[in-house]
Amino acid sequence: MLELRHVSKVYGEGLTEVHALLEVNLAVARGELVAIMGPSGSGKSSLLTIAGSLEDPTSGDVVVGGASLQGMSRREKSRLRRRSIGFVFQDFNLLSGLTAAENVAMPLELDGTSARAARAAAMTALEYLGLADRAEHHPDDLSGGERQRVAIARAIVGERGLLLADEPTGALDSINSEAVMRLLRDITRRGAAGVVVTHDAQLASWADRVVFLRDGRVVDQTVPPAGPESLLASGPQS
Ligand code: ADP
Ligand code: MG
């Protein structure tokens, strides 16, 4: 679903030149959740914005759902983002003037879906995230955990196949952080491809793979030790 091929990204030039990414290769299939870890400034956010077509790589190519971004026009990329790519950020990025349902419906409405169909899809996504009773609330009336679940609903509404989350648990306590990772795990298992940036090795253990970045390079890829889910699966059944 997502492939980065020899992706490099250089910001600035001359003395201010920064190599944010260097020859990064990464493939994420549907059904797969990949965690990205690395120190601050190692290129994690650059990797996500380039994977999500928000920025172009300096060299290399990105392929989403079989389509190369290289030859795409701005308009084609923005359509790809509306239809196929969901973003989740640390600070939620919800519109405070809109209700939860309106926030979730918005990407579909922007893509030309009728208000009624968009609303129905938004309600389905909110129900899946356990927020049906919060649909008419505004973000200011929701807890941090609820806001992030609304943002996740907005990222998956319309069945988008690629979910990109940049430190989605950065503003949450440990219980809500675990809940967010559990949801990302479930969403990807249902057929999306997911990439999640996290600082927390415990949270990263929800992923199928952890990719470590340092100074813009992939320095290690590991299959994490048995995570919380496998403990649940093999633990005593009630
Ligand atoms: P991380 O998310 O791992 O903290 P980033 O991808 O944000 O790292 O940044 C990687 C490097 O690229 C850093 O040195 C950062 O300062 C630089 N960088 C990121 N975005 C820009 C930009 N828009 N302009 C200039 N430099 C940038
Ligand atoms: Mg970052």
Image (spheres, rainbow, N blue to C red):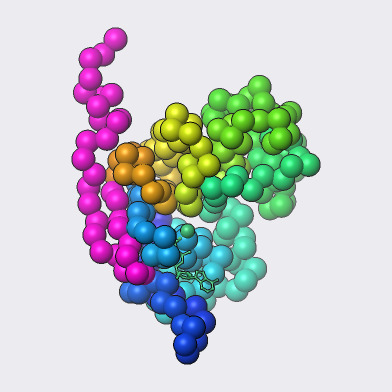
Q: Nearer the viewer, residue 25 or 212?
A: 212
Front position in the image: 115 or 26: 26
Q: Residue furthest right?
A: 97
Front in this rendered view, residue 108 or 209? 209
Q: Position of residue 198 (x, y in %)?
A: 40, 48
In-image side of 220 versus 61 (left or right) = left
Q: Does 231 appear in magenta? A: yes
- Choose top left, top right, bottom left or bottom right for residue 126: top right
Q: Position of residue 177 (x, y in %)?
A: 45, 35
Instruction: Name the quadrant of the N terminus.
Output: bottom left
Q: Position of residue 156 (x, y in %)?
A: 54, 43
Q: Is residue 13 left or right of residue 118?
A: left
Residue at position x 26%, y 13% in the image: 237
Can residue 179 be seen in the rendering of this structure?
no
Residue in the picture at 33% in, 74% down: 23
Q: Residue at x 49, y 45 (%)?
A: 170
Q: Residue at x 42, y 65 (%)?
A: 41
Report if residue 46 is visible in the image: yes
User: Is 86 placed above or below 181 here?
Assistant: below
- The boundaries of the magenta stretch are 209-238
Q: Is residue 14 magenta?
A: no
